[in-house]
Amino acid sequence: METIGKEIEVSCVLPCLNEEKTIGICIKKIKEVFEREKISGEIIVVDNGSADRSKEIAEREQAIVVSEAYPGYGAAYLRGLREAKGKFIIMGDADDTYSFYDIPNFLNHLRKGYDFVMGSRFKGKIRKGAMSWSHRYIGNPVLSSICRLFFHTKLSDIHCGMRGLSREAYDKMKLRTLGMEFATEMVVSALTNNLKISEVPIDYYPREGESKLKPLYDAWRHTRFMLLYCPAWLYFVPGILGFSAGMALLLLLARGPIYFLGRPWDLHMMVFANVISILSYQVMHLGIYAHTFALKQGFLKYDRVTRFFQRNFNLEKGLALGGAVFLTGFAILLFIFIDWFSKDFGALYRIREAILAMTLLVIGLQTMFSSFFISLLFLEKEIKD
């Protein structure tokens, strides 16, 4: 397209893999919108290894065609986004499932100051045959619900493939994933960077040819990414729940057997509570490591909880807390040994106290050694600052 001498306002980026039936249609629609709305724009088609005539057709339609050898939805988009010169960027698939006649709606929101504009197929109209029953009523709603729960957003369709953003927003996002999870990363990054986000209804149409989606595998990749970006749900929630339940049960059983639903809970259940407590405590510490690493790598931003922890935690406090727990466990073991010694090392029935003591010893040691490691991570951050 002819843009010489003009400042490019809009860059349309289309990833393409064997879309010879539809790539020309998509480009013509975009050009029609540009001409009708008098938009100074460019169309960038990223060929991701097509074996058909997609690249030839795109070039014939005067789009800017670049090639990305590394296979993947994210890899193609990252290449296209790097090539884009426009103030605003519109993203959409090259399979003609999205109507590029909706570009003015996205552009209106971007011109009003929104950083990131998502399309919503669920607020628009999903045409017959465009989306399978499982994707429409299970896959997409469930994944969008997880995102709303984890990241406190109201977005209704986080995997909609048509979206727009400003050049400044793209620079802040620092996107890096190469596969289908790129779609999730973009949304999560927009949320964690506190970008101004809007949502517009769009229609969704049946595609020509076979879908390149791998439903279960792609769903797992999206879920995995959200969990990695949200250590609270992956580590802290199960860790805190497990540790609280385990320690409560351990302390109850340390006094003697209890009866639940008409059945006695005794030493076997106490051993189980011991294991759950220790494992859950370790999971909580892994969450702290993961969260700190994510902050260092730029995956997450500092929030009030993180800053409070960094201000109030230091190695000495961690050692003191761990040491106190360890010494409590050691004191209980010492009491057991003295009792055993007083009985000339005869029969001893202090199993409950011993299990509790060993649990406290392990938790105390974990706390002390974890304090060294966490302090090292924060120390490196302080040195860099």
Image (cartoon, rainbow, N blue to C red):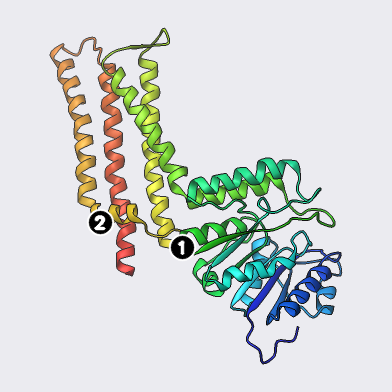
Asked if residue 377 lies left or right of residue 227, the reply is left
Q: CA distance from mark 2 to mark 1?
A: 22 Å
- Residue at image location 30% in from the left, 34% down from the top: 362
| Residue 178, position as x, y percentages in the image | 62, 61
Image quadrant in which the N terminus is located: bottom right
Q: Answer above or below: position of 362 versus 23.
A: above
Q: Which residue is mark 1?
A: 193
Question: Would you say residue 78 is visible in this rendering?
Answer: no
- Residue at image location 79% in from the left, 71% down from the top: 29
Image quadrant in which the C terminus is located: bottom left
Q: Answer above or below: position of 363 versus 205.
A: above
- Residue at image location 22% in from the left, 30% down from the top: 329
Q: State yes or no: discs 2 and 1 in contact (Cβ < 8 Å).
A: no
| Residue 132, position as x, y percentages in the image | 76, 45
Query: Element type at marker 2?
Result: helix
Asked if residue 24 lies left or right of residue 88, the reply is right
Q: Answer above or below: position of 267 versus 375.
A: above
Q: Residue furthest bottom?
A: 5
Q: Which mark is residue 311?
A: 2
| Residue 124, position as x, y percentages in the image | 69, 54
Which of the two discs, 2 and 1, labels the residue nearer the N terminus?
Answer: 1
| Crowd tier of the residue under label 2, counting other residues whose Cα lies within 10 Å: few below 14, some 14–19, many 20 or above | few
- Residue at image location 86% in from the left, 64% down from the top: 21
Front residue of this view, candidates 193 and 344: 193
Query: Element type at marker 1?
Result: loop
Q: In the rendered structure, which amino acid carries the disc numbered 2?
A: Arg
Question: Would you say residue 263 is visible in this rendering?
Answer: yes
Front residue of this view, candidates 364 and 176: 176
